[in-house]
Amino acid sequence: MTIRVLLADDQALLRSAFRVLVDSEPDMEVVGEASDGAEAVRLAREHAPDIVLMDIRMPGTDGLAATRLISADPSLARVRVVILTTFEVDDYVVQALRAGASGFLGKGSEPVELLNAIRVAADGEALLSPAATKGLIARFLARGDDGDGPDPARSERLGTLTGREREVLVQVAGGHSNDEIAERLEVSPLTVKTHVNRAMAKLGARDRAQLVVIAYESGLVRPRMD
């Protein structure tokens, strides 16, 4: 299967570099290029790519607003947004995760890291750049926009999960893979995958990254402060 990629960045030189890199892979192709967020949304609706590599800071409609629009469009439910940023961790990145992004990657990452990010996101996995500490991201997510703590609506939705699904969700929020969770809980990876998929369906999560957001914002998982 070929992974279809949409590039969204206001710098033409960067888009060209990304296109050459992506198109050099036998299992990937660039289906469009956008210079701002509004164009990214339009092209996403036109081409329905698997992955959108989205810059945050663009003129007009920025990457954050574009990510929110793409994530809110039912016809684009299968589209995954990977945020490309000059900064490894900041409020914009966390807002993008809340808006529906599947993760983020620094623009200074090595080509192999970018290609791996595309494949990871296409597989529905949560993507955080190697330089980003989970604890810092967790603190941002748990803090909330107004600093009032866990979201009651998120917490209430957790009541739809079984005990095992909640247990698996905690492990997902810890950044563990299905194989790692299976070993920890002494079950098969297929069983873990089933629990993850059921949790996503019940909580309305697009992918594992959104499960992480829900786990922290609901208060199910508390951030470590060290």
Image (spheres, grey):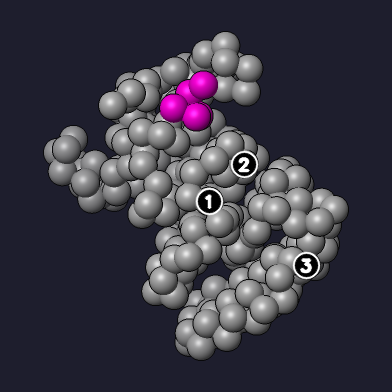
Say whether residue 8 is magenta. no
Q: Residue at x 66, y 53 (%)?
A: 56
Q: From the viewer's side, name the closer residue of 12 and 170.
A: 12
Q: Amino acid at mark 3?
A: Ser
Instruction: Choose mark 3 or mark 1, whichever is in front.
Output: 1
Circles 1 and 2, Cβ within 8 Å, touching? The answer is yes
N-terminal-most mark, 3 or 1: 3
Residue carrying label 3: 35
**Any mark on residue 87, and which?**
1
Q: Residues within 10 Å of mark 2 (few under 14, many from 20)?
A: some
* Helix, strand or loop for the magenta stretch, by majority: helix
Where is the C terminus found, in terms of image quarters? Answer: top left
Choose top left, top right, bottom left or bottom right for residue 33: bottom right
Q: From the viewer's side, name the closer residue of 123 and 187.
A: 123
Report x, y in % for residue 213: 50, 33
Q: Residues within 10 Å of mark 1 (few under 14, many from 20)?
A: some
Q: Amino acid at mark 1?
A: Phe
Q: Is residue 62 above or below residue 212?
A: below
Residue carrying label 2: 92
Element class at badge 1:
loop
Q: Residue at x 57, y 22 (%)?
A: 144
Which span is picked out in magenta?
139-143
Q: Residue at x 65, y 58 (%)?
A: 55
